[in-house]
Image (cartoon, rainbow, N blue to C red):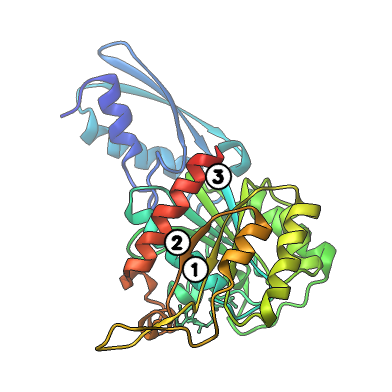
Amino acid sequence: MQETQGGILEGLRSIPFPGSGISLGDLNLVQSIEDSGKEAAISLSFPSVFPITQEEFKVFLEHALKKIAPDKEVKLDIRAAKPKELNRISHVVAVMSGKGGVGKSSVTSTLAVGLSRSGLRVGILDADITGPSIPKIFGLKNRPMAGEDGFLPLTSAKEHIPIMSANLLLEREDDPIIWRGPLVGKAITQFWEDTLWGNLDILLVDLPPGTSDAPLTVTQSLPLSSVVMVFSPQELASMVVRKAIRMVKEKMGVPILGLIENFSYYLEPGSGKRLEIFGKSNASNLTEFASAPLLARIPIDTELSVVCDQGEIEKYNSDAMQEMCRAFLEALKKND
Ligand code: ADP
């Protein structure tokens, strides 16, 4: 039995919202409590993004409170709120690449999983509207919950990472999305404002690849803190990466947190020899050009492509992944 004010608050905050893997505290629904011994007045927010009504939420809370504080008379004050009023996101970090196919979505997903494992609350906004692959990498098939005020993201099976993607709103996952620039911007702004993320330490945004209008519009529609650039050694002698770096520096006005070289080398089974299959690393030239650190060199790993294909990224672990997350957090701290 928890009888102190903090006890009730902690108890309420740790309850998962019905039908979602996210707790009331992480959704930032519990606002305040006034405890006068026998009685307590609790104030909560309720945005219409859930499949239950405010009245049903109240009944759910009354049941929960009977267990948390059975002897207390509790008065509930539940107020409607918009998702954007409740979102508290410390860092919005975009993951970008000079072109498609370099592993941007795989890196975004492994980063999210690794950072979650270290106890941070991480979400993913899949803004790669023309080729959204994040739901597939996490094996998500359902549609997100939705109400008048917007959406509640789906959550990954193991780490409960909240994930929002245009693909989750399509009738069929292979339906094409043919949206032109302004519509892309509108859709992303809507995802941003109308999704209840709640409290997040980091929101990773998987950007459309390249240096066209699409990634630029997306970044201009979001309050980005920084950008991570993913590249591979064979990218046309790094010309496309330089273009992307220049776009961040000259047009986006956000710092580059760091660079990640994917498909960097292959560890020969048995000998453990590093083979640079796609050519020599260009990382040192690029880090100098970007004035940003190299966060990781990720090897070619067939296990990574298998877990991504099977929607089981949360089973994956590797030394390179852990190193990348450590370096990412260090860079984030320096950037603050
Ligand atoms: P992008 O988002 O840049 O288009 P993806 O993340 O979809 O690229 O990766 C493209 C393909 O390469 C996917 O099939 C993915 O599983 C695979 N892949 C990505 N990184 C690696 C890696 N380090 N080792 C092996 N396969 C990888």
Please indicate whether residue 186 sits to the left or right of residue 25 in the image: right
**Is residue 254 visible in the rendered structure shown here?**
yes
- The amino acid beneath tag 3 is His
The CA distance from mark 3 to mark 2 is 14 Å
Quickly name the residue at label 2: 111
The CA distance from mark 3 to mark 1 is 17 Å
The CA distance from mark 1 to mark 2 is 6 Å
Q: Position of residue 187 (x, y in %)?
A: 73, 61
- The amino acid beneath tag 2 is Leu
Note whether 62 is above or below 21 in the view shown: above
In terms of image quadrants, where is residue 65?
Answer: top left
Quickly name the residue at label 3: 91
Counting residues from the start of the chain, the first of labels 3 and 2 encountered is 3
Q: Residues within 10 Å of mark 1 (few under 14, many from 20)?
A: many
On whether ligand 1 comes within 8 Å of the CB at mark 1, the answer is yes
Count of marks, rendered view: 3
- What residue appears at the point 32 percent right and 70 percent down from the top-left corner? 318
Q: Quadrant of the image for the N terminus?
A: top left
Please indicate whether residue 198 sits to the left or right of residue 184 in the image: left
Counting residues from the start of the chain, the first of labels 3 and 1 encountered is 3
State if disc 2 and disc 1 touch (CB < 8 Å): yes
- Tell me the SS state at disc 2: helix
Residue 107 — which label? 1
Q: Which one is in front, 94 or 85?
A: 94
